[in-house]
């Protein structure tokens, strides 16, 4: 499991040939590790060569609370004595989710049951999947995060696309930072006085969107989704003993566990689209 | 008081001790717990029907009898129906023998006031679908108990 602030340990085992062909661990003549961050930037943590254990390479990259959330992709490039190269890729999904692994375990009533590292990592992955799924289902950012948008200027107002807006960090009009703006309700940004300069994507707004305190109905939807994702990954189909199998296809399974009130509360947060 | 709770518990413990680590023993219906495995033994997943009568003139002791349903359920990926059948049947036979040949006698280790014996009736259900091959052997244990 990895959260922002954790140290990501990238590991790789180098064999002179595939283990199933009798390969043995060996050291490389040279090795590099390139970690691609979720924002597209790259870093190259130092890899000790030769390693303390033949063929077993590790390298750390430490994230901070300010590090971008998302997928960290680490690629080892090994240069062998023969001059040939081989690579190994390892990834980490890092970042917050609507519910924590502990909350998911409590919802699953799986305290003391889900204890293995692999299972906990799988559950953390499902927490992140559920968060993404709920946000995309609603068409709305729930977890607070910084958004940068470019808008066409020319008028006195700009409608920010990601709501709710918590705060506006900066506004740039044709590349010049401006401070004479007012954030209205519903994500409307007013230029006061005057108007934004005309031009395609001439106004760049950086702001924090989402809910500082995510609605509980949304968190409940995420937990129910996690429950079904987990159960479907852990439970084989049991058609001969499952009394609910016949009705399973009538509604989305997670909705079967939400009361009408919960469902209406959840649906009330859905962004209305324009056909 | 009825002996049903202690009998269910004893059957659960006996099944856990009899079946291997790849079997999951569940006291109740399949959805009574969150995580299930491919191989499950469900104890009392269907209604338990019985009868209790006074067995003395003192109105203090009763004799009850009931049948506990069990099912050895196997759900395997792939296409080998025979493997699923064999696994379910093996579990059924192991539990049936364990009850019948318990070291303390046919009483699940609960004392001489309880008698537990397989009824001898069983059924094999088989199903093949996109998820794999499924087999379930349903059988039952007859319980006769005297209570105070």
Image: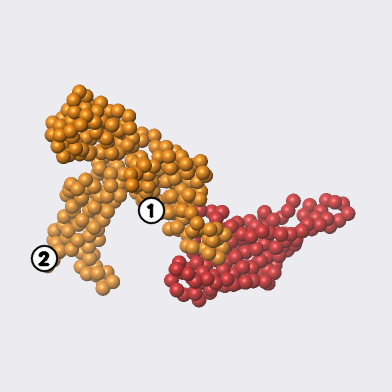
Q: Is residue A193 visible?
A: yes
In the displayed image of the protein, which residue is found farthest to the top?
A: A193
Image quarter for residue A273? top left
Q: How far is disc 1 from disc 2 in space, using C-alphas?
A: 38 Å
| Quarter of image, res A4 | top left
Residue B73, image x and y in percent? 55, 66
Q: Which chain is orange?
A: A
List the residue tagged with mark 2. Answer: A83
Expressed as whole percent of the image width and height from the top left, the position of residue A57 reads: 23, 56
Residue B101 vs B55, above or below: the answer is below
Q: Tell me residue A22's x, y (percent).
A: 26, 72
Dividing the picture into quarters, in which one does residue A234 lie?
Answer: bottom left
- Mark 1 or mark 2: which comes first in sequence? 2
- Graded by Cα atoms within 10 Å as few (under 14), some (14 to 19) or many (20 or more), the crowding at tag 1 reads some
Does dot 2 land on a helix, a strand or a loop?
A: loop
Q: Colour of chain B?
A: red
Tell me, for residue A122, which label it has, or none: 1
The answer to whether residue B22 is visible is: no
Depth order, front residue of A223/B17: A223
Query: For the view shown, which residue lies furthest in the left direction?
Result: A83
């Amino acid at each position: 499991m990895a959260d922002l602030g954790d140290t990501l340990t990238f590991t790789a085992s180098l064999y002179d040939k595939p283990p199933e062909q009798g390969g043995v661990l060996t050291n490389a003549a040279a090795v590099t590790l390139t970690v691609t961050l979720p924002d597209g930037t790259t870093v190259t943590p130092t890899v000790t060569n030769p390693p303390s254990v033949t063929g077993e390479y590790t390298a750390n990259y430490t994230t901070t609370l300010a590090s971008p959330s998302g997928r960290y992709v680490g690629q080892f490039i090994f240069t062998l004595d023969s001059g040939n190269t081989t690579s190994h890729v390892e990834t980490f999904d890092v970042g917050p989710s609507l519910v924590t692994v502990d909350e998911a375990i409590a919802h699953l009533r799986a305290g003391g049951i889900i204890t293995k590292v692999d299972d906990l990592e799988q559950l953390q992955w499902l927490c992140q999947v559920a968060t993404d799924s709920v946000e995309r289902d609603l068409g709305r950012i729930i977890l607070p995060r910084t958004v940068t948008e470019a808008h066409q200027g020319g008028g006195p107002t700009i409608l920010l696309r990601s709501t709710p807006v918590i705060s506006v960090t900066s506004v740039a009009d044709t590349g010049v930072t401006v401070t004479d703006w007012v954030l209205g309700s519903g994500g409307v940004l007013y230029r006061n006085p005057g108007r934004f300069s005309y031009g395609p994507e001439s106004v760049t707004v950086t702001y924090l969107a989402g809910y500082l305190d995510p609605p509980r109905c949304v968190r409940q939807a995420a937990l129910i989704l996690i429950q079904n994702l987990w159960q479907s990954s852990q439970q084989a189909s049991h058609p001969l003993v499952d009394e609910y199998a016949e009705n399973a296809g009538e509604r989305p399974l997670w909705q079967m566990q939400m009361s009408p009130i919960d469902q209406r509360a959840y649906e009330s947060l859905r962004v209305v689209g324009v056909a | 008081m009825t002996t049903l709770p202690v009998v269910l518990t004893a059957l659960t413990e006996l099944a856990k001790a009899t079946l291997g680590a790849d079997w999951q023993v569940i006291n109740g219906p399949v959805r009574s717990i969150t995580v299930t495995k491919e191989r499950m033994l469900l104890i009392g997943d269907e209604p338990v029907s019985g009868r209790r009568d006074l067995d003395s003139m003192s109105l203090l002791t009763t004799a009850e009898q009931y049948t506990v349903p069990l099912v050895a359920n196997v759900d395997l990926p792939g296409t080998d129906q025979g493997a699923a059948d064999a696994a379910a049947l093996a579990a059924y036979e192991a539990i049936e023998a364990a009850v019948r040949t318990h070291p303390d006698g046919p009483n699940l280790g609960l004392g001489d006031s309880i008698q537990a014996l397989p009824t001898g009736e069983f059924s094999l259900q088989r199903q093949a679908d996109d998820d794999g091959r499924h087999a379930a052997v349903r059988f039952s244990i007859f319980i006769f108990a005297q209570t105070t």
